[in-house]
Image (cartoon, rainbow, N blue to C red):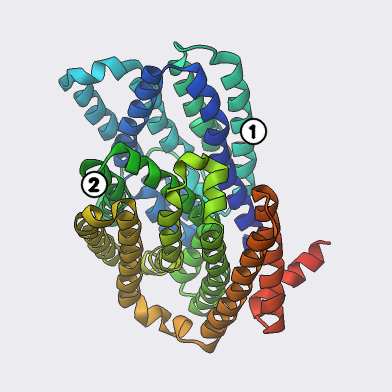
Amino acid sequence: MKHKSLALNAFLNSLRSVLNILFPLITFPYVSRKLTVDGMGIYNFSNSFISYFLLIAALGINTYAIREGAKYRNNKGKITQFSSEIFTINICSTLIAYVLLFICLVLFSQLHVYLLCILIFSLQIIFTTIGTEWIYQIYEDYTYITIRSIFFQILSIVLLFVFVKGKQDYLKYAAITVFSTVGSNFLNFIHARQYCNIHLTFNFNWKKHIVPILILFASSIANMIYLNSDITLLGLMKTNYIVGIYAVSSKVYGVVKTLISALLLVTIPRLAMLFGNHRIREYKNILSKLTNTLLVLALPASVGLFMLAKEVILTISGPNYIRSVSSLQILCFAYIFSILAWILSDCVLIPAKREKNVLISMTISAILNIVFNLVFIPLWDENATAISTVLAEASMFISNFYFSKDLVSDVFKSKYFWKNFITSAVGCIGIIVICLLCNSIIQSMIIKTIFSIILSVITYGIILLILKNEIAKSILNKVKNIF
């Protein structure tokens, strides 16, 4: 099979991530004015409630399927058998999720007011399973996924403005949200036949798949606790105002992290395939390039966001959220730890079938995050939660490195890695200087932000080229080839 360009896949995945971010940004201001507070409350609660059953239906199937399926993608017979087995397990977990959902709806009368909205959102469960998006990730077919996302999200925005007109239309909004998310998944199932003839099958060794899938599922639960515990504890120990302040900085942190990690996500299937087929030299080569490229991207992103945190908060949320600046600046220190920990878990430990180690790392980080929050929140409010996130991300990186050091020591101890780190750090000094100069010279916030970003990118690139950074030269050559 011809390999897709990792750079093109990274661009397409970034574009898809941006669209997933833009859709709620475009729709939320409109629907929040059209719907009542009660309608929005029912919508948000129902959506949040269904997310737990989506997690049950998903188990750890997506990660496991990409890791194992990547080894068979050049053999249609084997990939058909493997995909059919995984799809059958996914159908069973989906049925279990629906049974648990209906039991909850019957037992808890408080949910009856949300019944119709919950049932609409529950369509996501079956359509996510049918969508078998992991097949497209195994074959690195991000072109199809991105084009599909663009079409259905644009169509959903049109439907939103046509059908959501008043306070009673929250159910229509829920249906349109589901349509935008999984509307194309039935088409996915049909289109996947170009790769494999997926079908239900029950005559196979279930235990072979179930054990690692359940370990990855436990890791997903630990990760969910890790991600949600900070805001939950902040809400229990402080006011809604402080939660709202931190929610803004956390959202910005998450958006930038998603964009930086686009290259990582599209590289996982390639690395899983190489490791699974024992092509270790090629695996190490791509892993080294991925690690160093993300290092060169994450450092300037974190420094730039730190310097422009005030402008970003004012642009996105307005002056009422100016207090979010300090917590956002603290979160900037987490980017490097987070990205490197992510590489070690998804690109090293999971392909090496060390999912138990990932579970241990996730659990340690989740526990530390809770402990740090309990200790620090009474002292520093939302800044304490940001500090706890940085420490938990650092813990995740240290744990993952410990469990994978026999596989990655040569990557992290190489002269190439440290040269990239040093040249990138020097380039970041240039970003700091540019941002300080723009802040002192330009009064308009919008113009200052635009010039700070453009000049910082140019300055950072020039410094890296002067210092003969190989990644910067490679990017420059690719840009030249495009033009």
Residue 233: assigned label = 2
Residue 209 visible to the viewer: no
* Residue 180 coordinates in the image, percent (x, y): 53, 30
If you read the primary sequence from the N terminus, does the residue marked by circle 2 or circle 1 appear first?
1
* Residue 325 coordinates in the image, percent (x, y): 46, 53
The residue to which callout 1 is attached is 151
- Amino acid marked by disc 2: Leu
Label 2 crowd (10 A; few <14 / some 14-19 / many >=20): some
Viewer-side residue, 206 vs 3: 3
CA gap, disc 2 to disc 1? Answer: 39 Å
Against 89, is 480 above or below? Answer: below
Locate the N terminus by quadrant.
bottom right
Locate the C terminus by quadrant.
bottom right
Tell me what residue is drawn at x 38 percent, y 55 percent. 64
Q: Decide: marks 2, 1 in contact (CB < 8 A)?
A: no
* Residue 176 coordinates in the image, percent (x, y): 51, 23
Against 367, is 243 above or below? Answer: above
Image position of 197 (left or right of 143): left
Q: Quadrant of residue 100?
A: top left
